[in-house]
Image (spheres, rainbow, N blue to C red):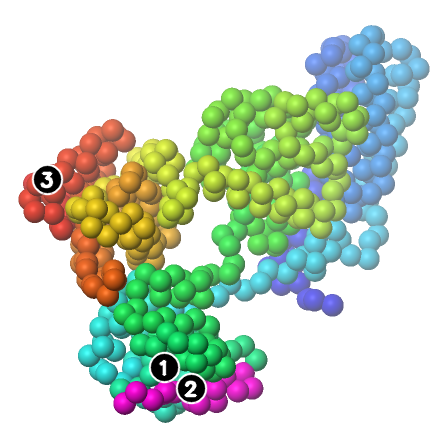
Amino acid sequence: MTILPDSFQKQLTALRETYTQQLLNKLQQIEDLWAERHVNWNNRTLAALHRMIHNLAGSGATFGFVTLSDRAFTLERFLRTIMEADSPLTLEEEAQVSALIAVLAEATQPDPLPSSRLDACLLSHPSPPLSKNNRIIFLVKEDPVLARDMMLQISYFGYTVRTFSNPSELRVAVNETIPAAIIVDLVSVDGGFAGTETIASIQHDREVPIPILFISVRSDLAARLLAVRAGGYAYFTKPVEISALIDKLDTLTAHQTPDPYRILIVEDEATLAAYYALTLEQAGMLTSLVTDPLHVMQPLIEFRPDLILMDIYMPSCTGLELAAVIRQLEAYVSIPIVYLSMESNVDKQLIALSLGGDDFLMKPIHPDHLVKSVTSRAQRSRILRSFMIRDSLTGLLNHTKTKEQLAIELSRAQRQNLPLAFAMIDIDRFKSVNDTYGHTMGDRIIKSLARLLQQRLRKTDCIGRYGGEEFAVILPNTDGKTASLVLEELRSGFAQIRHQFTGQDFSVTFSCGVAEFPRCPDVASLSDAADRALYTAKSRGRNQVLLAGNA
């Protein structure tokens, strides 16, 4: 049996204790509200009583009060029939409700359980430790000049490259450090094959082989077959197209753990909301809690959830009303909304789904069911949204999403009184590149710059493809001077990357304009200032970074 981490076990215990402490108060509130029938009874009071009983039915079993939950469910269904009849209480109905409330008040002790529902969830979904990407590359090349040149080309894309002049040195190094990949020149300077025996010995008895990328002047089948037999993962003929090599390295070193799914939980019962959050967080997700549905807009904008988990019965507005409001906002039309409720009436469930919901989960829900349902919906949501907001060639944010993200980041910077930089980048003389080398090569260069930006900028920075050869970068919590230095380093690196076309090398440059908040106080002024700075950089000779205000 897996032992729960102390921190999570403490949270589970604390949640159950909190619920137990609040339970007597909740039952007293129910009795007090029912007592008002003698002086102030109307449909609104009945609806409030129904909501309180509904919440109790949905939350009790979650924290071990199974009997309480069952009795509350019976009372909730009876109150619903009274509400649907829309007629004054009869003496018989009044007596039944009083009896059911009295029985409910007797179930204040948790039922004995071999293990709590939360325990089951945590045992079923242990959080795997996250490891950082391995970006160390070993390069074996006899010619020191060519080795240094290739090392620099690869390092521009954020890799750490160690060079070795012969396979023997490589064998010693691998015993100390396991690289993400090994690049080997298959043919030595004297024309023979080099390193294949050493590579084979390095791979021998290794549970997880190290990916080997061979480079060679030869393209014949015999050479390729030798590389495959030596465990070659890829084969590149000289002159090596650096973008193709980086594509393969990116595939090898990509982080296999995706960004955690982001789940917005809208639930007025704070303890229950915390339970859902703990369950999903233990499964590796990120959560944001909203206990007042009227305060949902800010976290909806800033948290950017993949899915909304929402209760139906809430005091200030119902989940159905809130879903309808969210669906009126164009930016959130596609976000999945999953209802959590005790509502068992199929017709009412269908109405709820027709008003903007995507799924209906019945309370109390088993942790494993909750995790699997949320994961499935969030995964599809992320895939579909990526098609809508990302550029198909580069995978970067598209023009519309970039502008939307700039507004979000600027709003955050204004609220937190933090700096923000916005940069516009344009590849120099790109039309000439397309005319000279063709559109396929032009696409490679665009992808090369996109990859460079993704690998060298922070994960918190937002990168978008603004137009054909134009890019935009949002750098939160960064002033204009710092952003200019970062982009200058990128400009220098990009200018030194060489591209191959029919045996010839050529390089490409870019120009960049940078604007900063608070000097530019809104989205329009930031965009205009960065665009003007870019235009000025172009007019001054291109291949430079210019900060707005320093022209």
Q: Residue 229 location in percent, x, y?
A: 50, 81
Specify start and end residues of the magenta stretch as a single range.
190-206
Task: Identify the residue at image location x=34%, y=36%.
Answer: 399
- The secondary structure type at the circle numbered 2 is helix
Relative depth, front residue between 339 and 223: 223
In the rendered image, residue 205 lying in the magenta stretch gets the answer yes
- The secondary structure type at the circle numbered 3 is helix
Task: Give whichever of discs 3 and 1 has the lower sequence position.
Answer: 1
**Against 65, is 301 above or below?**
above
- Residue carrying label 1: 186
Q: Residue 127 location in percent, x, y?
A: 59, 60
Real-space CA distance between mark 2 and mark 3, rounded to the nearest whole angstrom: 53 Å
- Residue carrying label 2: 196
For the residues labelled 2 and 1, say whether their Cβ atoms are less than 8 Å apart.
yes
Q: Residue 457 location in percent, x, y?
A: 31, 54
Q: Quadrant of residue 27?
A: top right
Q: Amino acid at mark 3?
A: Thr
Q: Quadrant of residue 546?
A: top left
